[in-house]
């Protein structure tokens, strides 16, 4: 396709003044390597992709024995980036879509071989607006430099529908405001009924109530030293009536706050970086980025009391990561984090089988790039999910704690 575009470019230049054609060609070159001019449109286009071949080996502490101890994943990603200059500023459309083949779900039971289509990014940027499917504006660290399709790593990395606006301010400062999809942020509500509770979705649609999107705002700065971001989100906790406890839908609001900073550390190595991030959530636990590697459990947003009112779940998390480049061909990332959530109500503690959960994670990887488009990576993750005040319950952990290790070998090629 690129050869066709290049072949057509001379014909297109014949239809426009040579000075305009030369200016457009220079503009495409300035956008970065791989951009070419699309004839008659004034659009700079880059087409690329990547292929990942990964093998995972997992181990658990007793639970769950049926989960796949090893499995393979192959991922093909197709990337397009189109940019044009308009009277209202730059227009950009970007896509990153993946076709994934796997022999098992991450940390789950082994399944028959199957393909999945997984959009990662499909957005339009114009005049400050971002519209489409994109990384949540709330995210900052987002597991940067942690590789693979299925990392068992603490840190929020959520892709969701986004409608947002970015204000570019002086000296590298910026501010953002967005409405984002709520489905990916709903961690459910647990009715307080000992031993018989069933996780209920945050879904008021059965009563005809209108679901409010996530409201996300950020403020930050990018400079030669690195960058920082302050994030805030409002999350509607809403649910249809359960049984005959209450005759109307229960609604409440949760929120999350986050602060993150990334330092460039050229004195330690060219391209070295350090990430530090902390988050707090009240009734919006998905923003903490906690992970139970079994895939079975997550922190609920709230518990519903017998009178229908909601008891919000509160928690926090802190993560850090250091990337070091040993030389032009070798680099390593070292990462870790801790997070927890607490359950204050005694009856809710009986329902969940714990007064709170602590989640630890540490890991590291080493990557070798013998040639530009090819990289081999070996990565290790350790994850511990532990209950405080444990007792067996229908919605709690089957054990007081679950330790899990993950070893990944990945070969990646980009084009």
Image: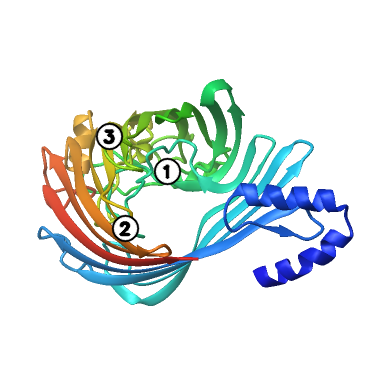
Q: Is residue 132 left or right of residue 355?
A: right
Pick out the residue farthest to the bottom: 112
Q: Tell me the quarter of the picture where residue 88 sits.
A: top right
Instruction: State the residue at coordinates (58%, 56%).
Output: 95
Tag 2 residue: 329
Instruction: State the residue at coordinates (48%, 44%).
Output: 203
Q: Nearer the viewer, residue 123 or 18?
A: 18
Q: Tell me the quarter of the picture where residue 407 sits.
A: bottom left
Instruction: State the residue at coordinates (54%, 27%).
Output: 174
Residue 317, disc: 3
Tag 1 residue: 186
Residue 249, disc: none
Q: Is residue 125 left or right of residue 298?
A: right
Please name which of the two marks, 3 or 1, marks the residue nearer to the observer: 3
How far apart are the two marked residues, 3 and 2, measured between alpha carbons? Answer: 33 Å
Query: Which of marks 2 and 3 precedes in the sequence?
Result: 3
Pointer 1 with pointer 2, Cβ within 8 A:
no
Q: Nearer the viewer, residue 228 or 5?
A: 5
């Amino acid at each position: 396709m690129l050869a066709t575009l290049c072949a057509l470019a001379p014909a297109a230049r014949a239809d426009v003044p040579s000075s305009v054609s030369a200016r457009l060609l220079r503009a495409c070159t300035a956008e970065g390597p791989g951009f070419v001019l699309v004839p008659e449109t004034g659009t700079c286009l880059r087409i690329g992709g990547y292929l990942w071949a990964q093998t995972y080996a997992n181990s658990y502490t007793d639970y769950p024995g049926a989960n796949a101890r090893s499995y393979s994943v192959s991922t093909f990603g197709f990337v397009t980036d189109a940019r044009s200059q308009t009277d209202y500023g730059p227009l950009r459309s970007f896509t990153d879509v993946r076709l994934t083949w796997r022999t098992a779900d991450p940390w789950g039971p082994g399944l028959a071989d199957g393909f999945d289509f997984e959009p990662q990014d499909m957005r339009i940027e114009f005049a400050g607006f971002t519209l489409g499917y994109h990384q949540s504006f709330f995210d900052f660290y987002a597991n940067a430099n942690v590789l693979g399709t299925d990392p068992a790593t603490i840190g929020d990395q959520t892709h969701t529908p986004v409608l947002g606006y970015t204000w570019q301010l002086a000296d590298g400062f910026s501010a953002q405001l967005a409405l984002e999809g709520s489905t990916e942020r709903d961690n459910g509500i647990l009715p307080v009924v000992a031993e018989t509770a069933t996780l209920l979705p945050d879904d008021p649609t059965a009563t005809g109530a209108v679901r409010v999107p996530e409201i996300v705002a950020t403020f930050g700065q990018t400079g030669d030293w690195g960058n920082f971001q302050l994030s805030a989100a409002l999350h509607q906790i809403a649910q249809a009536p359960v049984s005959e406890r209450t005759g109307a839908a229960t609604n409440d609001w949760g929120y999350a706050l986050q602060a993150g900073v990334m330092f460039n550390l050229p004195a330690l190595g060219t391209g070295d970086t350090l990430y530090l991030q902390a988050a707090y959530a009240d009734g919006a636990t998905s923003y903490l980025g906690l992970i139970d590697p079994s895939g079975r459990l997550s922190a609920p947003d709230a518990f519903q009391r017998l009178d229908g009112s909601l008891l919000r779940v509160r928690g926090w998390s802190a993560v850090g990561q250091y990337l070091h480049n040993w030389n032009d061909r070798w680099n390593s990332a070292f990462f870790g984090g801790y997070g927890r959530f607490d359950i204050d109500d005694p009856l809710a503690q009986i329902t969940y089988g714990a007064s709170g959960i602590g989640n630890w994670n540490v890991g590291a990887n080493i990557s070798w790039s013998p040639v530009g488009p090819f990289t081999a990576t070996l990565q290790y993750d350790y994850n511990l999910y532990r209950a405080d005040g444990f007792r067996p319950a229908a919605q709690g952990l089957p054990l007081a704690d679950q330790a899990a290790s993950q070893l990944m070998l990945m070969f990646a090629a980009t084009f």
